Amino acid sequence: MILELIVPRCLPVAPRPVAGELLSSWIERIAAANAITGAELLKSVTDCLSMERQHALLDYCLAPTLRCALAIAGRVSDLDVQALELGNQFRNLQPEWVLPGAKVVLIPVAKPGICTECIAEQHIAGVPMHLRAEWALAFLTHCPKHFRWLSISCPICYCSGSYAFTAAASNLLCARCGHPIPLHFFTGDYKASTVAVVLLGSQMLRTIKGLPPDPFWLGAISAERFLSTINDILRLLTHRENGEGSILANSLGPCEFSSYQPLTRGIEHPPLCTLPARLRLTLMAALAQFLLGPRSAAYFESAQNVRASEKPCYPLSRMALAPDEWEFLETRLRFWPFYLRERLSAALGHMGTRRPQAKAARPELEFLFLST
Ligand SMILES: [Zn+2]
Ligand SMILES: [Zn+2]
């Protein structure tokens, strides 16, 4: 419940943002320092705006009026707030890759996670506890530094993705039940298959910052081309007509990463950012296998001991494309690296037959974020 409060335009306590912090994390810290919640702070500054809609896209890019109101409330400049927006922290970032962190029509809430080891490091270094901007990126399911699973649940109420800061900023609490989140309880997963998926996520993180990608994945290509190719493949992996993403993910992803987490019915083409963490991991593993191609066997047990007749065994080989997916591919493939185009046409082979029925167009992301 959000209380009707009279909140001063300029808040009495205004902790500074930390470099690389998630925008909503800074908002929560300001709110906690003034004994209100982030939702109450937002409500107080967005009276004339639709709060849910603003909140859904909050971390990516703010409306100028909201940015100005937050800058006044937190006693920083507009530019300081703008610098925290994910679109500015990561200049090659696709909006579809940002976890909304708020209610989305018909589908479960996908919220930024935390790396408990990074939080513990902040505590030791005396830096205010905060959420890192990259934890809101849908393709990162593990911390690229510590390889820890980011979707941490509260040990008492099992709620995940809802964390609250105390006014003293020395504790991270479960926002639902108030229990402290233990910082040294969870261990990293260093299996070769997980390492491959996390390394791919790290490369994507590097390239959305504008840095050149490691040629290991797609050869010597620019950051923009690397990301657009990956975006095309992720779109193919999520843009399916058979409804439940978990069925799709399980049929495409390597079996080490099978997920049985169902999606809410009614969303046929869920963007990556709306998927639960387990499904995103499955899809990222499928993507890693496709990009690695024959090298997959070095990382994924499921890619080993495959008979020659079953090759190519990479995830996209099990897709039968719908007419609009063919159309999509025909317009996009010329931008892909040549050998990847070859791999896809070999992979689709007999499975890549056109389906006769037409399919509705994918709903726009904006539509999905409309409040109910
Ligand atoms: Zn970490
Ligand atoms: Zn809890």
Image (cartoon, rainbow, N blue to C red):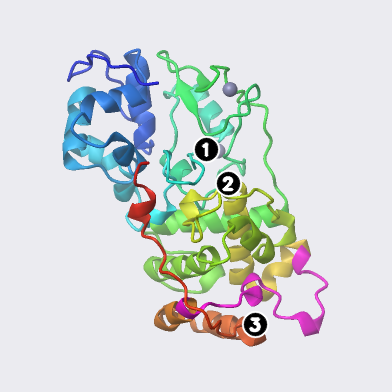
- The residue identified by callout 2 is 277
Q: Nearer the viewer, residue 34 or 219?
A: 34
Q: Tell me if mark 2 has few (under 14), some (14-19) or many (20+) residues whose alpha carbon lies within 10 angstroms of its own.
A: many
Q: Is 333 placed above or below 138 here?
A: below
The one nearer the camera, 190 or 141, is: 141
Residue 255 appears left or right of 372 = right
When asked about the image quadrant of residue 353, the answer is: bottom right
Task: From the image, tell me which residue sits under label 1.
Answer: 113
The residue sitting at 48% across, 66% down in the picture is 235
Q: Tell me residue 219's x, y (percent).
A: 51, 74
- Tell me which numbered mark, 2 or 1, is placed earlier along the sequence: 1
Residues marked 2 and 1 touching at CB (< 8 Å): yes
Question: Which residue shows up at 18% across the image and 32% down it?
Answer: 48
Q: Nearer the viewer, mark 2 or mark 1?
A: 2
Amino acid at pointer 3: Met
Identified by mark 2, the residue type is Ala
Point 52% across, 34% down: residue: 161
